[in-house]
Image (cartoon, rainbow, N blue to C red):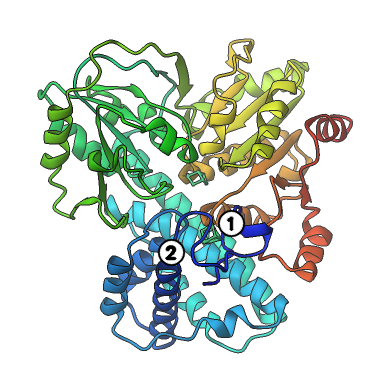
Amino acid sequence: MFCFQCEQTANCSACSGASGVCGKSGAAAQAQDNLTGALITLAGMNSKDYNLFIDGLFTTVTNVNFSVKSIEALIQRAGVKPYDMTQIWNADEDIRSLKSLILFGLRGMAAYAYHARALGYSDDEVNAFFVKALAALGKDLGMDDLLPLVMETGRVNLKCMELLDRANTQTYGTPSPAEVETEIEKGPFIVITGHDLRDLELLLKQTEGKGINIYTHGEMLPAHGYPELRKYNHLKGNFGTAWQNQQKEFDSIPGALLFTTNCLMPPKASYIDRVFTTGLVDFEGVAHIDEAKDFSPVIKKALDLGGYDEYQPGKTLSTGFGHGTILGLADKVIESVKSGAIKHFFLVAGCDGIKSSRNYYREFVKKTPDDTIVLTLACGKFRFNDLDLGNIGGIPRLLDMGQCNDAYGAVKVASALAEAFGCSVNDLPLSLILSWYEQKAVCILLSLLSLGIKDIRLGPTLPAFVSQNVLKYLVENFAIKPITTPDEDLKAIIKH
Ligand code: SF4
Ligand code: SF3
C-alpha cells in the first residue's frame, strides 16, 4: 500500500506496510486507490454523476470507511476502468505534491458538499470543479498548470463551505451560545459521533418519548448551539472528547453508539456490538444503518444495555459562538479593540490527533495574555476547551465557533473585522495557529491561502506530501511556518 494523506502517516513519510497507522488495511488502501482512479477516469469522460464524485471522494477521507466491500461497491457504481494511481504516486516529487494537494483538498471539500447535499443544498460551480480538478489529475501537467489549480481548489472550497453554512443555518437556525453538560444521567442512552447534523436530527426525532438520552461526541458538540436541535429535551449533553480517544472512552460503555461521517476509530471488541454506522461510514463486522435511516436497531440496543445505574458527574463546556453570534457582538468587539481592552485575536483551530506534541495547543492557549481572545473550531479544541479563560468586558475569552465544517465562519469574522478597521485580514491583530490531521484541514488551509492570508502557523508537523519546492513556494508567497514552542511563537506574535 501507499498512503501519505494524513498527519499520522508512518515516519512522517508514508504508510507502506501491510496496513496504515490508522488501521486501514492494505486491501482497503488499494480499493481506495482504485476508487479514486475510477473517479479520475469518469471525470476525464466529463461525467455529471456529481453524487458519485462526492460519495467516492468523501469515502477516501482518513478514518471514514475501512470496508473493502463498500469501497468496491462504489467502484462498481463508477463502472469504468480506473486510472492507474501509481502514475501519480511515482511521478516527479513536485508534481506528486501538487496533485496530492489538489486530490486531498477535493476529498475534504467533498465532505462539506456531502453535508450540504444531505440538507438539500448543492452548487453548480462546486460540482463542476470536482470534475475539472479530478480530470486534471489524470493529465500530464506541469507545475505551472497545477499551482493555479491548487489555489482554485481553495477558492471553490470556500464557496462549498459557504454553501454548507447556509444549509446548516437555514435548516437548524443560527447557532447561539450554549452551555453543554458532560455529566451522564442514569438510564438508556445513545452517543452520536461524527459530523452529520441531519443524522442527529433524525435520531432525536426517532428517540423522542422513548426514555433514551442522546449525547454528542467529538465534532457533534457544536450541535448544541443550533436552536432546532437543542429544542429536544433529551439531547442532554456531550460525552467524551476528540476522535482519537474513542477506543478508550467507548470501552465497555453501557450505551449504543452511532458513527456518522468522520473521524472514527476502528471499534474494539469490548464495544463493537454496540456500534452502528451510517452514511458513508463502514467497518467490517459492524451493523450499518442504510439510507432509510431507520435507527430502531440503535434504539433497541440502547434500551437493552440500559445505561449507567448511577449518575456520572461531569463538567460544563460552552459552544455555539458561530459567526452570527460573534458578528452580533461586533460593536462591542470593535469598541474593546479601540479602547485597548482587546489587544489580539488568535484563531487556534483544526484537528486533534494522537501525537503528544499536540499539547502545544493547550499550552499555547493557556499562555495567551489576558487581553486577548481565542477563537476556536474543529476537534482540536478538546485539547483546551475545559480551560476557564475568563472574559473581557463580558466577551468570553475562548469562543467555540463550531465544527471543522464551520471554518467558513472564521473567514467571515476575519473579513468583517478587516472591513470595520479598514485594513486587510493580514493587517489585523489576528494570528492563525492551526493544527491539521486529515484532508478537511487541507482544503481549509488551501481556502485561507487562496484568500491571500499570510503567516499561518501550522502543526504539529508539516504534511509529508508537501515537497521541498512546494514548501519553498508556500513559504515565499504566504510566509507559512511550522509551530515551534508556545513561548517562542507567542513572543514572535505579540511583539509583531
Ligand atoms: Fe497512513 Fe494516514 Fe493513510 Fe491511514 S490515512 S494509511 S494513517 S497516511
Ligand atoms: Fe477533527 Fe480534523 Fe477529523 Fe472535524 S477537525 S474531525 S480531525
Q: Quadrant of residue 390?
A: top right
> For mark 1, what is the residue?
442
Q: 496 or 334: nearer the eye?
A: 496
The residue at 33%/33% (across/down) is 173
For discs 1 and 2, the disc positioned in front in the rendered view: 2
* Image location of residue 159, percent across then percent down: 49, 57
Q: From what the image shows, is residue 104 above or below residue 323? A: below
User: Viewed as shown, does residue 204 lie left or right of 164?
Assistant: left
For residue 371, which quarter of the picture?
A: top right
Question: Left of 404 or right of it: where is 308?
Answer: left
The residue type indicated by label 2 comes to Ser
Q: Secondary structure at mark 1?
A: helix
Q: Amino acid at mark 1?
A: Val
Is disc 2 placed on a helix, strand or loop?
A: loop
The one nearer the camera, 414 or 247, is 247
How dense is the environment of label 1, judged by Cα within 10 Å: few (below 14), some, or many (20 and up)?
Answer: many
Rendered position, 310 above or below 53 = above
Image location of residue 360, percent across then percent down? 71, 34
Q: Residue at x 48, y 42 (%)?
A: 406
